[in-house]
Image: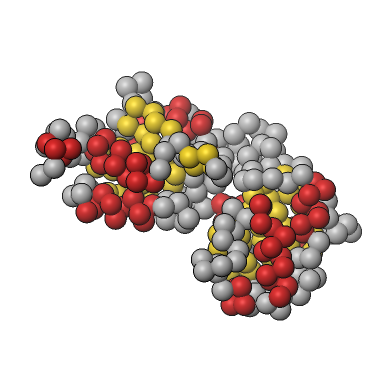
Amino acid sequence: MSGRDKQLSPFVGMVYLVGAGPGDPDLITVRGAELLRHAGAVLYDALANDALLGLTNDRAELIYVGKRAGRHAMSQAEINELLRQKAHQHAIVVRLKGGDPFIFGRGGEEMDYLRRCNVPVEIVPGVSSAIAGPAATGIPVTHRAVSRSFAVVTGHAVTGADAPNWRALAQIDTLVVLMGVAHVQEIVEQLLAAGRSPETPAAAIQSATLPDQRQVIATLSALPSAMAEAEIGAPAVLVFGEVVHMATLGRGQEAWLLPHPTSHPIAPYALPGAPAPIPIQW
């Protein structure tokens, strides 16, 4: 046993890797919300809505461990170790992660580390922005008529050894790119070089499901310029495929901004004609 381990209590609680959902706090799962109410410590990400912290009890430790481009509150190794330490102090430790813990959230790395340290872990899935982002604009990622497959890829590494197989991805009916705003031009160039039509419908949705949601619709080749003109920034979801037409039916412009469909401060998005959502009482 190391000196560091000797300083820890023999007590070991449970760590819960909880998906916070795509942005709107109403979209966290019931299980996730309940765990936040009882947690002794909450380690939360940059993309987890701050409103969710209002669910915690007055005694809970709230620890920010978020990562944004070039700005990391702490390293992944430090987060892993902090989770282990908090598990020896609290019966319930929540690691609150934007979207789903296992979709580009390093949840697998944290789970593996904690298991090797004999700390029990439970995974609480969350609604990923890869699905909810397009849905917030009326875009289904699958549709029997035009899309029987979809893929989700990170936009961090566009070229080099860590780059995805763009030739294979160009054949997927619907392609969703997360964290791709900074490299959208290179992503488009890779897809065009891999054979994707420049006329492929494309969309970029910023701050999906939140009151300040904004989106732009264009063709694949025109998306970078349309995003620049509309000043679409991170966090945003990029969508490529015929399903994007589901958001553009009846509109004559190639690219435009769409207002967020609701002005309610925390209500989920609602399609025109849909019944009003039932808000959660926070």
x, y percent for residue 232: 73, 46
Is residue 79 visible from the viewing direction of this image? yes
Is residue 139 visible from the viewing direction of this image? no
Left or right of 209: which side holds 74? left
* Quarter holding residue 277: top right
Left or right of 230: which side holds 32? left
x, y percent for residue 253: 88, 57
Asked whether 211 or 82 is in front, the reply is: 82
Q: How many marks?
A: 0
Q: Is residue 106 above or below residue 172?
A: above
x, y percent for residue 64: 43, 33
Left or right of 7: which side holds 137? right
Give the residue displayed 62% in from the left and 77% down from the top.
Answer: 167
Asked whether 40 or 73 is in front, the reply is: 73
Q: Where does the N terminus fall, quadrant-wise?
A: top left
Asked whether 107 or 36 is in front, the reply is: 107
Give the residue displayed 31% in from the left and 52% down from the top.
Answer: 111
Give the residue displayed 36% in from the left and 56% down from the top.
Answer: 108
x, y percent for residue 65: 43, 37
* Quarter holding residue 254: bottom right
Residue with the most extreme top position: 58
Q: Is residue 164 above or below residue 179?
A: below
